[in-house]
Amino acid sequence: MVELIEYIAKSLVDDPSSVDVAMTKNDNSIDITLKVASNDMGKVIGKQGRIAKAIRAILKAVSLKEDVKVNLEIEEY
């Protein structure tokens, strides 16, 4: 899942080298933190959060297959 988020984010931003994805596993959930440069934040979130919602929808589909809860948090540098 981390590779998927990293691939999507690097495809969207102007500076792919500034994308950082970290994962933390808990008992029955996974927390994924996506960090991007402040000038690329709008490209990752999209108008009215549409791109962020689409990324979360993809994560939800993958998480249902693996039977685990996934949380995505988007932060800026």
Image: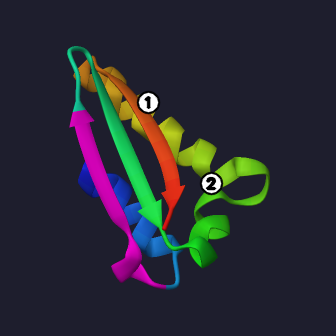
Q: Is residue 1 visible?
A: no
Q: Residue at x 62, y 54 (%)?
A: 51
Spot occupied by residue 71 in the image (x, y as percentages of width and height): 43, 32
Q: Amino acid at mark 2?
A: Ile
Q: Residue at x 69, y 60 (%)?
A: 46
Q: Is residue 75 visible?
A: yes
Could you tell me if the residues under marks 1 and 2 are in contact, i.e. CB atoms within 8 Å?
Answer: no
Q: Could you say whether the residue bearing mark 1 is in a helix, strand or loop?
A: helix
> Which residue is the site of mark 2?
51
Spot occupied by residue 18 in the image (x, y as percentages of width and height): 39, 77
18 part of magenta stretch: yes
Q: Residue at x 37, y 54 (%)?
A: 5
- Range of magenta residues: 15-24
Q: Could you say whether the residue bearing mark 2 is in a helix, strand or loop?
A: helix
Q: Amino acid at mark 1?
A: Lys
Q: Is residue 77 above or below residue 32?
A: below
Q: CA distance from mark 1 to mark 2?
A: 14 Å
Q: Is residue 17 above or below residue 48?
A: below
Asked which quadrant contains residue 44, the reply is bottom right
Q: Nearer the viewer, residue 52 or 76?
A: 76
